[in-house]
């Protein structure tokens, strides 16, 4: 490849991008999340940015936004909006249950909290084990979600809007 790059400098041509396998083989093993990326043409290349990795996913109908710190020993943070606390006129029971869950919830690696617009948020954080492969990062995300699952399940019931009986 070095001779192709040298030839490209002499002829003024742009060197062909490395293939995926060549890029991966030039990367220290095991390949960790953030070591490689796709460029705008879809070619695999070494990632040289020190910005965090961001991705999102849906779990049980809730969208979570994940941020993995660029620091190799930094945390994976998950954030999601669980729902909005209902007004008493909508469902007094649901409001009371949601507020009770919020006051009693103790997540080992995160927290449930309510903003000024009565939206309930969940924030979870843990440091993935090294090496930070896709498997260890996704396993960390799964473990965080399992910590929060009982609370998310209860809030799902409390925030469900009551159905009105159909008149026929």
Image (tube, rainbow, N blue to C red):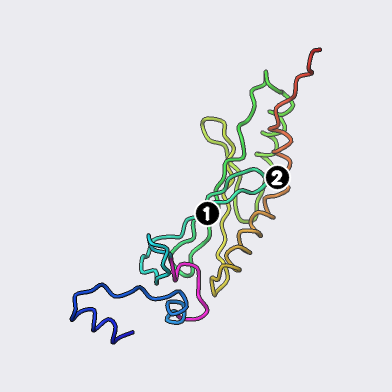
Between 6 and 26, the one nearer to me in the picture: 6
Q: Position of residue 82 (x, y in %)?
A: 62, 40
Describe residue 140's horizontal placement relative to residue 4 as left or right.
right
Between 100 and 82, the one nearer to me in the picture: 82
Identify the residue at the far right of this view: 168
Residue 32 in the image: above or below residue 78: below
First of labels 1, 2 by sequence position: 1
Locate the C terminus by quadrant: top right
Q: Residues within 10 Å of mark 1 (few under 14, many from 20)?
A: many
Question: Which quadrant holds residue 49?
Answer: bottom left
Q: Residues within 10 Å of mark 2 (few under 14, many from 20)?
A: some
Query: Which residue: 55% across, 65% down?
Result: 127
**Which residue is denoted by mark 2 in the rendering?**
151
Q: Position of residue 165 (x, y in %)?
A: 79, 18
Which label number is shown at residue 160? none
Circle 1/circle 2 CB separation < 8 Å? no
Query: Which residue: 24% across, 84% down?
Result: 6
Query: Which residue: 46% across, 67% down?
Result: 34
**Which residue is denoted by mark 1 in the rendering?**
66
Residue bounds of the magenta highlight: 28-37
Question: Which quadrant holds residue 39?
Answer: bottom left
């Amino acid at each position: 490849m070095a001779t192709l790059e040298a030839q490209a400098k002499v002829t003024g041509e742009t060197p062909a991008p490395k293939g995926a396998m060549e890029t991966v083989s030039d990367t220290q093993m095991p390949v960790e999340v953030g070591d490689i990326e796709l460029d705008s043409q879809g070619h695999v290349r070494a990632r040289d940015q020190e910005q965090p990795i961001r991705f999102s996913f849906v779990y049980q109908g809730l969208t979570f936004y994940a941020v993995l710190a660029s620091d190799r020993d930094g945390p994976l943070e998950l954030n999601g909006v669980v729902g909005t606390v209902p007004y008493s006129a909508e469902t007094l029971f649901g409001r009371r249950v949601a507020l009770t869950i919020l006051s009693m919830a103790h997540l080992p690696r995160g927290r449930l909290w309510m903003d000024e617009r009565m939206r309930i948020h969940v924030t979870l954080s843990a440091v993935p084990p090294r090496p930070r492969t896709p498997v260890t990062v996704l396993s960390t995300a799964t473990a965080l979600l399992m910590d929060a699952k009982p609370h998310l399940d209860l809030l799902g019931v409390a925030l469900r809007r009551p159905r009105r009986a159909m008149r026929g």
